[in-house]
Image (spheres, rainbow, N blue to C red):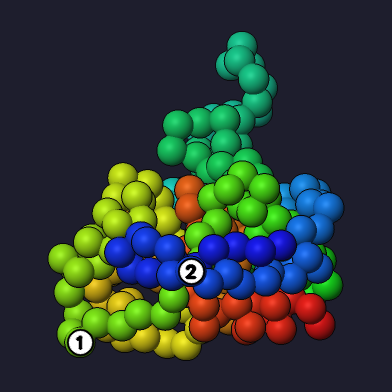
């Protein structure tokens, strides 16, 4: 598929780029997308939750009343889960929520996400640019020119660009990543995907393996 190349002023450069159909025009696999996003979110969980069980709460283990003759149920230690301040039954314990996915499935998920953005016409190709120094104001001007000022956007660079990255860091709705850092979650979490020309080769190379 062919896409027009824009400059940072939002105007057409008169050039077009050919995007690989094997990456940007496949039959989207929504289940692969679901699994990849699920793994990403699971990996963000710390899993440090912990509740004390009856062996861990503070308190005496003395039997609190005699076994028979009280007219009420039998009772042992006050650390029993039945009493206030007692232990928790089967409470949460520290654990890892991460799980493994095959590389082929993760590539399929990213290609599916890119295809969905292309189908929704939320994919823009912009010629490579740089700032002489980090400047949030300059980055906002780029967003305005591309019509993305009030939208969540993801800029994908070919190589690490410190000035562009630092310029976007204070903006809540915009993110900047390199082609090697691109994830299914990041693609879907943005309303618009902005691909710099220099990132296209790396994206297609990473996802065509």
Rendered position, 4 above or below 200: above
Q: Position of residue 92 (x, y in %)?
A: 59, 50
At horizontal 57% and vertical 30% (from top left) the residue drawn is 82
**Which comes before the other along the chain, label 1 or label 2?**
2
* Quadrant in which the C terminus is drawn: bottom right
Which residue corresponds to mark 2? 14
At horizontal 45% and vertical 31% (from top left) the residue drawn is 84
Q: Residue pushed farthest front?
A: 14
* Quadrant in which the N terminus is drawn: bottom right
Q: Position of residue 182 (x, y in %)?
A: 57, 71
Residue 54 vs residue 121, the one in the foreground? 121
Q: Quadrant of residue 100?
A: bottom right
Q: Quadrant of residue 65?
A: top right
Residue 110 vs residue 70, the one in the foreground? 110
Q: CA distance from mark 1 to mark 2?
A: 26 Å
Which residue corresponds to mark 1? 132
Position of 115 with respect to 163 (left or right) is: right
Circle 2 sits in a helix, a strand or a loop, which is it?
strand
User: Decide: marks 1, 2 in contact (CB < 8 A)?
Assistant: no
Mark 2 surroundings within 10 Å by alpha-carbon count, few (fewer than 14), some (14 through 19), many (20 or more): few
At horizontal 23% and vertical 61% (from top left) the residue drawn is 140
Front: mark 1 or 2 = 2
Circle 1 sits in a helix, a strand or a loop, which is it?
loop
């Amino acid at each position: 598929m062919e896409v027009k190349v824009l400059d940072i002023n939002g105007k057409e450069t008169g050039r077009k780029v050919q995007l690989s159909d094997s990456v940007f025009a496949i039959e989207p696999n929504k289940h692969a997308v679901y699994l990849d996003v699920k793994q990403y979110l699971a990996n963000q969980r710390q899993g440090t939750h912990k509740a004390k069980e009856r062996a861990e709460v503070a308190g005496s283990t003395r039997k609190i009343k005699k076994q028979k003759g009280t007219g009420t149920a039998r009772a042992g230690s006050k650390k029993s889960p039945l009493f206030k301040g007692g232990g928790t039954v089967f409470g949460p314990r520290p654990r890892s929520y991460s799980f493994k996915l095959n590389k082929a499935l993760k590539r399929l998920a990213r290609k599916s996400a890119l295809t969905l953005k292309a189908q929704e016409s939320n994919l823009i190709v912009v010629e490579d640019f740089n700032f002489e120094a980090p400047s949030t104001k300059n980055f906002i001007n780029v967003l305005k020119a591309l019509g993305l000022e009030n939208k969540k956007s993801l800029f994908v660079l070919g190589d690490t660009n410190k000035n562009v990255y630092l310029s976007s860091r204070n903006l809540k709705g915009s993110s900047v990543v390199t082609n090697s850092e691109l994830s299914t979650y990041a693609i879907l979490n943005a309303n618009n995907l902005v691909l710099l020309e220099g990132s296209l080769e790396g994206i297609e190379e990473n996802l065509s393996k």
